[in-house]
Amino acid sequence: MMNNMHAMMKQAQKLQKKMQQTQQELATKTIEASSGGGMVKVVANGAQKIESIVFEKEVVNPDDIEMLQDLVLAAVNDALTKSQEMVSSEMGKLTGGLNIPGF
């Protein structure tokens, strides 16, 4: 019984180490999302941080700031959603689909 517990603890430590390594790797991976037919592009990484926002010149209209705000919001939210999906997918591979809080 004690041998089983020790083996389980070792396995859990290996999984934790692999998960930390995967999180570090994911922080360097990026995804791109856009809105307005590509007029606003947002790049996010696997740490759910926005790395860049790019506007096409045509979308910048001082008379319609609200449209630009909506496009930025849509692209940022899409980028963050895609980033979270990327992380969930990679972590799911490690945990076999188990939902482990914090990962």
Image (spheres, rainbow, N blue to C red):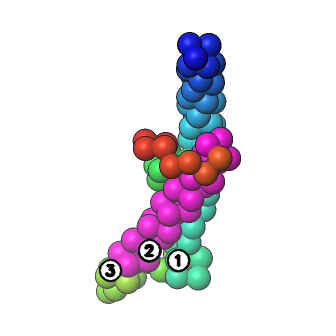
Q: Which residue is mark 2?
A: 74
Q: Amino acid at mark 3?
A: Ile
Q: What residue is at 52 percent from the left and 56 percent from the top?
A: 84
The x and y percentages for residue 62 are 34, 80
Q: Amino acid at mark 1?
A: Ser
Q: Quadrant of the N terminus?
A: top right
Identify the mark nearer the N-term, 3 or 1: 1
Q: What residue is at 59 percent from the left and 76 percent from the top?
A: 38
Any magenta on residue 85? yes
Crowd around label 2: few <14 · some 14–19 · many ≥20 (10 Å):
some
CB atoms of marks 1 and 2 within 8 Å:
yes
User: Relative to 78, does residue 6 appear above or below in the rendering?
Assistant: above
> Is label 2 in a helix, a strand or a loop?
helix
Q: Which residue is mark 3?
A: 65
Q: Mark 3 against mark 1, which lies toward the viewer? A: 1
Q: Which residues are magenta?
A: 68-95
Closest to the observer, 94 or 21: 94
The rendered magenta stretch, by its main secondary structure, is classed as helix
What is the C-alpha distance between the residues marked 3 and 1? 15 Å
